[in-house]
Structure formats: structure tokens, C-alpha cells
């Protein structure tokens, strides 16, 4: 191992913990924010240029988008894991075959997603709660998005390989280029060309084309040691099987998240029609869907940077755990808990105080929608300050190699606790019960996570 890498690894066990966490968190925070920008910017400009009906249409398409992302994650994470192992073993020919097979699989997954989406689009959107008003809007948006499915799989999938080849900044700047393109094109297509919901879809597709083009260019230029080569793109079953075996477990949560969002959309539509009596053109269900789309955008702005910060602790925890420097493990966990909890407590207080201010840009001039979204946001984020406890616990178990416990904690918040509450609470509290499910699941996941974390920390001597 070179002196540079030896010194860098040793700093994990000697350098200031706050400095190390910030050093590893900032790139992760930027990456998380960039990924969040696609949906947030779409909803912002759609709210400005189309209105609440457009936001409802985009929100109904969200579970299908998550499914496409899960398809990309299976290949990207699984292929990259195998790729990194072969690089470490200095088996460069096998690494090249894995990279190129992954590229081929991403294209095939995009074709599958396109065909699946086109065939089942209308019944799926109806199942998610699309009304006669929102169905045409959602179909117009989703049909264009599906045309660019190949860019949605290549960009995030192949970016994993750039990082493994030692170019994290290159990967980050390519993501930023796509996000900036999305902002510019949303403004141009929606606000200037007045293309409506189709403009938002085309902006997303074109920006992902930019990102995937830049990422593909990295793998075909001469300076890249392992490149895309036609002769290695032919699928080889042993590698394909290993890619799916390694990629499926971390992608299960994304698939479950898609299922959860589908159940949530159906619940919002069903109980929104019962609880809300809007005076405008939207039905109660469509208004509830639109309100959740606004809430999801605001919450993403806050939660994803927090997730990036927590992810920055994983390599520090992992190194010190392996080196048996348990005081530094505990110190890193304590630092993460204090700062993450403080950040979320402030964010929670601001949201409770100024919810109307945060939702207003997404529904300009629609006071009724703003009131509904602000009311729902205060319920939905009632336990916001509890999120860091479950999140830091999950990061600890991931960093110490206990992946199943980490997956269990993530599943508690998004599946094990949330889905039952989503199905039960609305029977008693109608639409309010739909929004209550998330804070109750957040609280339960935090209690379980802290219990598991404290038990594990006591064992460290």
C-alpha cells in the first residue's frame, strides 16, 4: 500500500472526529441534494406554471419512477460491488467484463421498465388513485419519462463505477451537470415555452441525457483505464447471476419504498375524497395527492442532506470498529447524534412555525391548497426530531458490517411500521390518519433503533 493511502487510513484513527465527519459528509450531502433536485425542481416549476393539478399528476407517477430507480440500483450496486472486488484482486480483464455486462444490463432494464410501464401505465395509475382529472396529466408526464428510461438507469448505475475507479469528484460533477440542466430546462420549457406538464417531463429526460452522456463519455475516452468495449458487453451468465445476487438486497428497500408510495397514493385519494370538500376544480383526493407532493418536496430538502451527513460517519465508524478503537466509535456516534438531532429539532421548529411559507411557492395564488398542504405538513412532520436517532443507529450497524440490522431499521420506518399504520389509522381518523402514519412510524423506528444501538455500544470494551 502506498505511503499516501497508509497515512490517509491512519488519520481515521487519529484525526479530529468532527473534521473527519465533515470531510466525508460534504460530498455525500451534495450528491443527495443533487438527486433530490430532479423531483423538487419539477414540482416547483409545475406548481408555478401548471398548478396543483400538475403536481398531483407528477406525484401519482412517483411509485413508477422509484421502480425504475430500483432497477438501476440492482445493477449499479451489484455490479460495482463485484467490480471493486476484482479491482482489489488485480483481475482487470474480469473487472472490464463486469463493467461492460453491467452497462448492457442497465440498457436491458430500461427496455423492460419502458415496456412494463407502457403496458400497465393506466391500470397502475388508476390503482394509485388517479381520477378522471389527473389521469390524462399523469399519463402525459409518465409516457415521456418512460421514453428516457435508458438515461434514468445509465446515469445513476454507471456513476458507482466512476467512484470505485477513484474519481468521486468526477462522479459528483456529472450529477451536478444533470441537475443544473434540469433547472434551466424546467424554467425554459415550462415558464417560457409554456409546454406545461410535458415540458417538465422533457426537462427531466433531457437533463438525464446530459448526465448519462457525460458519464458514458468518461468510459469511452482513452485516459480511462477500464472502458466500455463492445467485445465485453456480451452477457456472461456467471457474472450476471453474481451481479443480481449482490445488488438485490440493497435494492429491496427501494422496491418496498415504491410499494409504500403506491399504498400512500391510494390512501390519499380515497380518504381525501371523504375528508376534503374543496371549492375549486380539484376533487378532495386530487388535492390530497397534490398536498403530499408539495410536502415530499419540502421534506426532501431537509432529510436528504441529513442522510448525507449520517452516511459520512460510516467509513469512520467502520475503520475504528475494525481497529478496536471503541472510544472513537462511541465518539463518532455521539457527535453524529448531537448534531443530527440539533439540526432536525431546528428544522422541525421552523416547519411548525412557518409551514405556509414553505408550501406557498409550490401553489402560488391557491390559498386553499396552501392551507391544506400546511395543515398536512404539520401532522406529517410532527416527529421530525425523532428521525436522526433511527438514522444514526442504522448507519452504525452498516458501518460495523451488520448489514441485516441496518436493513431492518430502515425497513421499520418505511415498511414494517409505516404500511400497517397507513392501512389502519385512516379507518379511525380518515385523511388525518394517512398523514399521522409517518410520524408514528418515525417514533417507533427511533425507539427500536436507539434500543439496539445502546445495547451494541455497551458491548464495546
Image: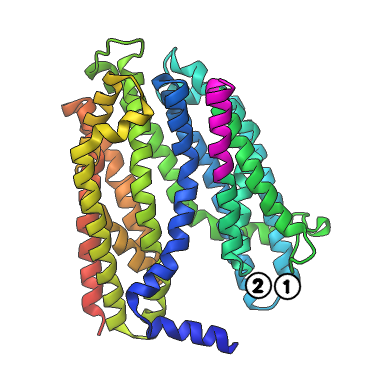
Residue found 56% across the figure and 24% down from its top: 192
Mark 2 in CB contact with mark 1 (< 8 angstroms): yes
Residue found 65% across the figure and 44% down from its top: 210
Indicate the position of residue 286 as horizontal and vertical percent values: 36, 19
Occupied quadrant, residue 233 = bottom right
State how far apart marks 2 and 1 are (Cα): 7 Å
The answer to which of marks 2 and 1 sits earlier in the sequence is: 2
User: What residue is disc 1 on?
Assistant: 92
- The main secondary structure of the magenta stretch is helix
Occupied quadrant, residue 180 = top right
Residue found 37% across the figure and 70% down from its top: 21
Indicate the position of residue 193 as horizontal and vertical percent values: 59, 22
298 falls in the magenta region = no
Q: Residues within 10 Å of mark 1 (few under 14, many from 20)?
A: some
User: What residue is disc 2 on?
Assistant: 86
The answer to whether residue 236 is seen in the rendering is no
Q: Is residue 364 left or right of residue 431?
A: right
Which of the two residues, 148 or 114, is positioned nearer the viewer here? 148
Image: magenta residue range? 179-197
The answer to whether residue 283 is seen in the rendering is yes
Amino acid at each position: 500500500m502506498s505511503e499516501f493511502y497508509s497515512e490517509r487510513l491512519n488519520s481515521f484513527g487519529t484525526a479530529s472526529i468532527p473534521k473527519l465527519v465533515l470531510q466525508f459528509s460534504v460530498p455525500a450531502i451534495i450528491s443527495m441534494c443533487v438527486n433530490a433536485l430532479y423531483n423538487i425542481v419539477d414540482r416547483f416549476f409545475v406548481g408555478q406554471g401548471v398548478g396543483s393539478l400538475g403536481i398531483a399528476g407528477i406525484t401519482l407517477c412517483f411509485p413508477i419512477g422509484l421502480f425504475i430507480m430500483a432497477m438501476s440500483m440492482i445493477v449499479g450496486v451489484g455490479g460495482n460491488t463485484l467490480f471493486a472486488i476484482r479491482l482489489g484482486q488485480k483481475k482487470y480483464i474480469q473487472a472490464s467484463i463486469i463493467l461492460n455486462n453491467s452497462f448492457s444490463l442497465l440498457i436491458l432494464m430500461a427496455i423492460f421498465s419502458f415496456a412494463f410501464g407502457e403496458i400497465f401505465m393506466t391500470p397502475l395509475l388508476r390503482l394509485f388513485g388517479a381520477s378522471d382529472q389527473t389521469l390524462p396529466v399523469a399519463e402525459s408526464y409518465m409516457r415521456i419519462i418512460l421514453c428516457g428510461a435508458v438515461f434514468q438507469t445509465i446515469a445513476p448505475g454507471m456513476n458507482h463505477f466512476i467512484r470505485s475507479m477513484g474519481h468521486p469528484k468526477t462522479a459528483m460533477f456529472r450529477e451536478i451537470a444533470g441537475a443544473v440542466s434540469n433547472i434551466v430546462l424546467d424554467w425554459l420549457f415550462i415558464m417560457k415555452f409554456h409546454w406545461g406538464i410535458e415540458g417538465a417531463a422533457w426537462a427531466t429526460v433531457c437533463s438525464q441525457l446530459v448526465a448519462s452522456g457525460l458519464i458514458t463519455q468518461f468510459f469511452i475516452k482513452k485516459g480511462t483505464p477500464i472502458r466500455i468495449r463492445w467485445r465485453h458487453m456480451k452477457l456472461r451468465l456467471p457474472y450476471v447471476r453474481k451481479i443480481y445476487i449482490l445488488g438485490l438486497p440493497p435494492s429491496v428497500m427501494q422496491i418496498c419504498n415504491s410499494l409504500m408510495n403506491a399504498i400512500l397514493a391510494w390512501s390519499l385519494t380515497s380518504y381525501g375524497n371523504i375528508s376534503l370538500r374543496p371549492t375549486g376544480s380539484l376533487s378532495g383526493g386530487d388535492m390530497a395527492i397534490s398536498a403530499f407532493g408539495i410536502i415530499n418536496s419540502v421534506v426532501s430538502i431537509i432529510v436528504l442532506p441529513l442522510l448525507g451527513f449520517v452516511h459520512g460517519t460510516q467509513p469512520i465508524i467502520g475503520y475504528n470498529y475494525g481497529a478496536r478503537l471503541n472510544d472513537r466509535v462511541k465518539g463518532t456516534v455521539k457527535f453524529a447524534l448531537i448534531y443530527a438531532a440539533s439540526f432536525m429539532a431546528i428544522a422541525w421548529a421552523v416547519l411548525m412555525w412557518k409551514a405556509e411559507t414553505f408550501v406557498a411557492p409550490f401553489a402560488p395564488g391557491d390559498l386553499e391548497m396552501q392551507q391544506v398542504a400546511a395543515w398536512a405538513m404539520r401532522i406529517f412532520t410532527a416527529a421530525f426530531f425523532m428521525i436522526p436517532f433511527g438514522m444514526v443507529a442504522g448507519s452504525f450497524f452498516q458501518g460495523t458490517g451488520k448489514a441485516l440490522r441496518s436493513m431492518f431499521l430502515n425497513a421499520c420506518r418505511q415498511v414494517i411500521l409505516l404500511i400497517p399504520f397507513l392501512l389502519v389509522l385512516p379507518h379511525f381518523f380518515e385523511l388525518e390518519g394517512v398523514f399521522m402514519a409517518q410520524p408514528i412510524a418515525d417514533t417507533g423506528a427511533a425507539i427500536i433503533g436507539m434500543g439496539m444501538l445502546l445495547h451494541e455500544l455497551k458491548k464495546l470494551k
